[in-house]
Amino acid sequence: MEYVPVSCRIPYLLKRIGKNQQWLADSTGLSKQRVSDIVHLRMDNITIQRAAIIAYYLDCTIDDLFKWEWR
């Protein structure tokens, strides 16, 4: 079994602070496409560094970025 993200909570977290994905891309230095890939779970993997940067700007923990399940 492995612990995998089953849904992304970034859109909810952005809405909570009144921002959008473009703002997140600009703030983190990630491309708009990379942010979109993360949001839609199309990434091969997300590095801990990227997750930490995103969590910092969204004022949450890394675990809060996704809904996780054991599979």
Image: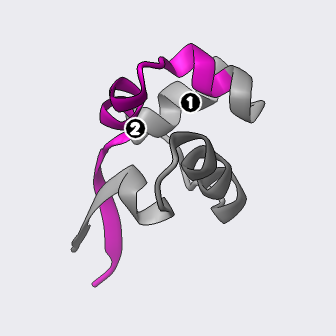
Q: Residue at x 60, y 18 (%)?
A: 23
| Rendered view: 59 above or below 49 | above
Q: Which residues are magenta?
A: 1-25
* Above or below for 3 versus 46: below
Q: Along the horizontal axis of the image, is 12 left or right of 35? A: left
Disc 1 marks a residue whose amino acid type is Val
Q: Which mark is residue 35?
A: 1
Question: Is 41 in the magenta?
Answer: no
Counting residues from the start of the chain, the first of labels 2 and 1 encountered is 2
Image quadrant in which the C terminus is located:
bottom left
Q: Residues within 10 Å of mark 1 (few under 14, many from 20)?
A: many
Q: Residues within 10 Å of mark 2 (few under 14, many from 20)?
A: many
Mark 2, residue position = 10
Residue farthest toward the right in the current orientation of the protein: 29
For the rendered model, the colour scheme is one colour
Q: From the image, state whether disc 2 or disc 1 is nearer to you.
A: 2
Q: Nearer the viewer, residue 5 or 63?
A: 63
